[in-house]
Amino acid sequence: MTGNGRIFLKYRVDIARRIANELKSVLSPEEEEAIKASPTKNPEAYDLYLQGRLFWYMRTKEALEKSVEYFNKAISSIRVMH
């Protein structure tokens, strides 16, 4: 996983709370639990998936091919865990 991806996963709860605070929002207990829940049990697969999404949104032939590569790597890293 890239450094930025690890930092985001580590601090995402704090980031969500700060955003809610800046927007003067109050998080419900359910919302607090939702942001505490881990988006994945495999950070490497999640990072590869996010990289694939980045290329997917570029919508060029080359970028779409690259996104498929990252999606396949994400799937492979999940299979390795099992």
Image (cartoon, grey):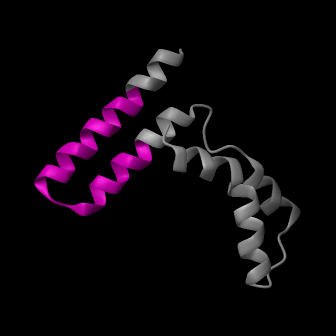
Is residue 57 one of those drawn in magenta? yes
Image position, residue 71 (x, y; %): 34, 38
State the image coordinates of residue 29 (x, y, percent, origin top left). 88, 61
Q: Quadrant of residue 48?
A: top left
x, y percent for residue 36: 77, 51
The residue sitting at the bottom extreme is 24
Q: How many dots with numbers?
A: 0
Residue 28, percent across and down? 85, 68
- The answer to whether residue 75 is above or below residue 53 is above
Q: Secondary structure of the magenta portion, mostly?
A: helix
Say left or right for 73 vs 33. Answer: left
Quarter of image, res 15: bottom right
- At x 18%, y 44%, the residue is 65
Compared to 71, does 9 lie above or below?
below
Residue appearing at x 40%, y 29% in the figure: 75
In the image, taking residue 81 as reference, residue 29 lies left or right, namely: right
Magenta-drawn segment: 49-75
Outermost residue toward the front in this view? 3
Q: At 74% across and 54% down in the image, what residue appears?
A: 34
Instruction: From this view, report whether residue 33 is shown above or below residue 45.
Output: below
Residue placed furthest toward the left: 61
Residue 73 included in the magenta stretch of the image: yes
> Residue sitting at 15 percent across and 59 percent down?
60
Image position of 81 (left or right of 41): left
Q: Quadrant of residue 74?
A: top left
